[in-house]
Image (cartoon, rainbow, N blue to C red):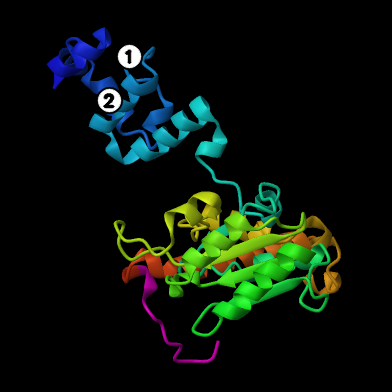
Amino acid sequence: MEDDLSKTDDRFISLTEKVANDVDDWEEWYNQPDPELHPMPGLAELDGVPRLVLLRIFRPDRLPIALETYVSASLGDEFVHQPPFTMKSTFENTSNMTPVLFVLYPGVDPTSWVEEFAKGRGITTAAGNFANISMGQGQEKRADETVVRFAKEGGWVFLQNVHLMQTWLPTLEEKLETLNPHNDFRVFISAEPPALSYMKNIPEGLMQSCICVANEPPADLKANLSRAWATFSQERIEGCSKSVEFKVSNSSCAVTLYTILVFWMIQRLLPTLGPILCVLYIATAPI
């Protein structure tokens, strides 16, 4: 291994001998809780990928954290921490010729995102310029008529679960390509991903013409908390009708809301930590 490393960087030459000569210093570095933040004995100038290689050898448990720091410093924080999804940023990339395809995952329902954002722009079912169609048997005609009408008059149509209508999707694809739509025309689509990677449930041409939104559920506490907090605007927090009830020890409503979100996230993540941390305790006496 040492011979292979020395071919890539001269500083790896006689690495085993260097470690043996400074065994006490290396042991102290190895026992650090965060060795990726401390200089390696005799290799203080080592940085970048070569340092990551050695960290992978000595402390592989700290490599993910070191990689996160390295990517963030090299490419930017947005490559490490995905900003919370917002309909506003998605809508800014749409046009009357560009549909939006939401990929459905367990626990993800884009219906409320689209409806609430549309409502804020005065586009509602009551106003006659918004239609939410759950695709299924017998809905093809209604969907066709709605797409044609809104393309002419202006409006938003949300076609849900189109993966259930694979035989009709080529018709939708052709219709979207041939229409000369109104400037206020928008098409939103939702579909589940295929069960296997080589399977297709949506025509490739339709996929390529869409803005695909794959907003997967967050996998950790920080990402869960960021997404949940992003759903509350500053105006909504300041306009809380129960600000007096939510205030605790002179803390603001925002602090109380943050505490509730942290508690909720922990409750959601506990089942993923295994049976040891998820034992069901039954109270045997009043508390």
Within the image, what quadrant is residue 131 found in? bottom right
Q: Residue furthest top?
A: 10
Q: Is residue 117 visible?
A: no
Please tell me how crowded label 1 is: few (under 14), some (14-19), or many (20+) other residues with Cα within 10 Å: few
Please name whichever residue, 173 or 187, is drawn nearer the observer in this view of the structure: 173
Indicate the amino acid at tag 1: Leu
Judge from the rendering whether residue 28 lies leftward or rightward of residue 235; answer left or right.
left
Q: Can you identify the residue that label 2 sits on?
A: 54
- Residue name at image x 53 percent, y 57 percent: 215
Q: Nearer the viewer, mark 1 or mark 2?
A: 2
Percent of width and height locating residue 12: 23, 13
Judge from the rendering whether residue 133 lies leftward or rightward of residue 173; answer left or right.
right
Indicate the amino acid at tag 2: Leu
- Residue name at image x 49 percent, y 25 percent: 74
- Please determine whether, in this image, residue 141 is positioned above or below residue 113: below
Percent of width and height locating residue 111: 62, 70
Percent of width and height locating residue 105: 46, 66
Label 1–label 2 contact, CB within 8 A: yes
Which numbered marker is on residue 43? Answer: 1
Judge from the rendering whether residue 234 lies leftward or rightward of residue 160; answer left or right.
right
Residue interval drawn in magenta? 277-287
Please name whichever residue, 125 or 222, is drawn nearer the observer in this view of the structure: 125
Q: Work out which quarter of the rendered image holds the N terminus and state it.
A: top left
Q: Residue furthest bottom?
A: 285
Q: Secondary structure at mark 2?
A: helix
- Please determine whether, in this image, residue 29 is positioned above or below residue 2: below
Please name whichever residue, 156 or 11, is drawn nearer the observer in this view of the structure: 156
Within the image, what quadrant is residue 35 found in? top left
For marks 1 and 2, give the CA distance. Answer: 10 Å
Q: Work out which quarter of the rendered image holds the C terminus and state it.
A: bottom right
Please name whichever residue, 142 or 80, is drawn nearer the observer in this view of the structure: 142
Instruction: From the image, give the main secondary structure of the stretch colored magenta.
Output: loop
